[in-house]
């Protein structure tokens, strides 16, 4: 296993500004700012969908140089209402990022995201390229069905690497429904029966967490609603399935690469775990090939999560290198 709080991260820090921004008649987004109020702005886009931000995420940036903006996406973390699926799509989140930028009076910023956060970073940058000075991306997910099927599908590549846990994942679903595992799990997360929802969330999230680190973790979720962590599991499973079962609300399956010309001139660093099973390295390689101003760092001995030491080290290096852009 690995030390979640590696020594080379920056010290713990508290926000100098935080609040809620009303982004629709339904949703209010929690945001916070840390670091130097006059520093170079960077927006941190968390994973999931539905993961939310944590205090540890503030520690990946030099607080003397950067003005770091973090926020909880719709339906998760401190944003309200929790687990709300209405008006909660990829394009709503893209619009929220721009509303936060305008609210804080920022002209341009560095965009930083991992896993689903890398996807959202690319969607945002392709929509508002003139507002982006650069991107730092980790664990690339290009929002294609082949990637979803490769991890969650009936014949998933990931199931060849973790066959025991994968069998438990598919055994939860009747064979007649296994042609679309994401829809089958999503239907159960929408069930009015709390017991059905909880069992599906346990099995779905256990499968995902099994594959996230280079060395498998022992995963235990009770989902008895006495634990803050277990409540967060329900929320993240629901929001992930809401997005994934709806194909990320994209008009085309290859939307990001189809629109890649819009961000050809944006300097980008891509940090990818060599043994990432959740988001296979081939996607990072394709993205690097499509972006002439990108740099791909394959991290040996690492998988998907941000807490693996090699991943952390390369992300710290990347934010140091991007200081030259400002």
Image (spheres, helix red, strand yellow):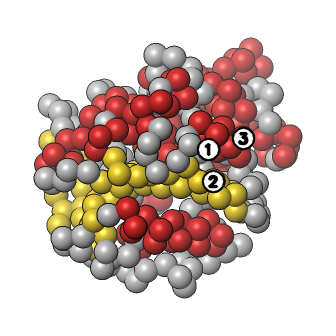
Does residue 89 sit above or below 295 in this rendering? Answer: above
Q: Residues within 10 Å of mark 1 (few under 14, many from 20)?
A: some
- Numbered-mark total: 3
Count neighbours of disc 3 (C-alpha within 10 A) and say few if under 14, some if 14 to 19, many if 20 or more. Answer: some
Q: Residue at x 46, y 51 (%)?
A: 267
In terms of sequence position, does the residue under pointer 2 or pointer 3 come before the other? 3
Q: Is residue 8 above or below residue 301?
A: below
Please report the residue visible at 77 percent of the width from the left and 32 percent of the height from the top: 156
Measured from the top left, where is residue 1 in percent x and y? 71, 72
Q: Quadrant of residue 198?
A: top right
Q: Secondary structure at mark 2?
A: strand
Q: For marks 2 and 3, give the CA distance.
A: 11 Å
In terms of secondary structure, where does tag 3 sit? helix
In the figure, 29 relative to 23: above or below? below
Residue 68 seen: no
Which one is in front in this view, the residue at disc 2 or the one at disc 3? Answer: 2
Alpha carbons under labels 2 and 1: distance apart: 6 Å
Q: Who comes first in sequence, dot 3 or dot 1? A: 3
Q: Are marks 2 and 1 in contact (CB under 8 Å)?
A: yes
- Residue at numbered disc 3: 282
Q: Quadrant of residue 38?
A: bottom left
The numbered dot on residue 288 is: 1
Q: Is residue 171 left or right of residue 265?
A: right
N-term-proximal mark, 2 vs 1: 1
Is residue 280 placed above or below 152 in the rendered structure? below
> In the rendered view of the protein, which quadrant contains the C terminus?
bottom left
Instruction: Quickly name the residue at label 2.
Output: 296
Is residue 305 or residue 100 the one in the foreground?
100
**x and y percent of residue 227 in the render?**
46, 60
């Amino acid at each position: 296993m690995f030390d979640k709080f590696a020594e080379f991260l920056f010290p713990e820090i508290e926000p100098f500004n935080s609040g809620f921004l009303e982004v629709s008649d339904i949703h209010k987004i929690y945001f916070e700012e840390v670091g130097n109020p006059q520093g170079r702005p960077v927006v941190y886009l968390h994973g999931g969908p539905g993961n939310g931000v944590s205090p540890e995420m503030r520690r990946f940036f030099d607080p003397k140089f950067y003005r770091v903006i973090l926020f909880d996406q719709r339906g998760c973390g401190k944003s309200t209402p929790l687990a709300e699926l209405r008006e909660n799509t990829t394009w709503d989140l893209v619009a929220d990022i721009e509303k936060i930028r305008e609210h804080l009076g920022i002209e341009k910023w560095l965009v930083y995201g991992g896993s689903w956060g890398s996807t959202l970073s690319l969607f945002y940058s392709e929509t508002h390229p003139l507002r982006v000075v650069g991107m730092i991306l980790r664990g690339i997910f290009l929002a294609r069905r082949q990637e979803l099927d490769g991890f969650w599908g009936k014949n998933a590549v990931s199931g060849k690497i973790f066959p025991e846990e994968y069998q438990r994942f598919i055994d939860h679903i009747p064979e007649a429904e296994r042609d679309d595992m994401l829809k089958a799990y999503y239907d159960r997360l929408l069930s009015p029966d709390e017991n059905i929802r909880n069992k599906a969330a346990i099995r779905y999230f256990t499968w995902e967490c099994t594959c996230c680190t280079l060395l498998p973790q022992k995963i235990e979720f009770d989902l008895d609603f006495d634990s803050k962590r277990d409540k967060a599991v329900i929320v993240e499973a629901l929001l992930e399935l809401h997005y994934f079962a709806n194909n990320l609300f994209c008009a085309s399956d290859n939307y990001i690469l189809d629109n890649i010309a819009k961000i050809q001139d944006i300097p980008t660093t891509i940090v990818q775990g060599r043994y990432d099973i959740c988001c296979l390295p081939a996607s990072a390689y394709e993205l690097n090939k499509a972006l002439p101003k990108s740099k791909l760092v394959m991290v040996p001995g690492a998988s998907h999560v941000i807490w693996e030491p090699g991943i952390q080290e390369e992300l710290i290096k990347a934010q140091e290198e991007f200081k030259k852009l400002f």
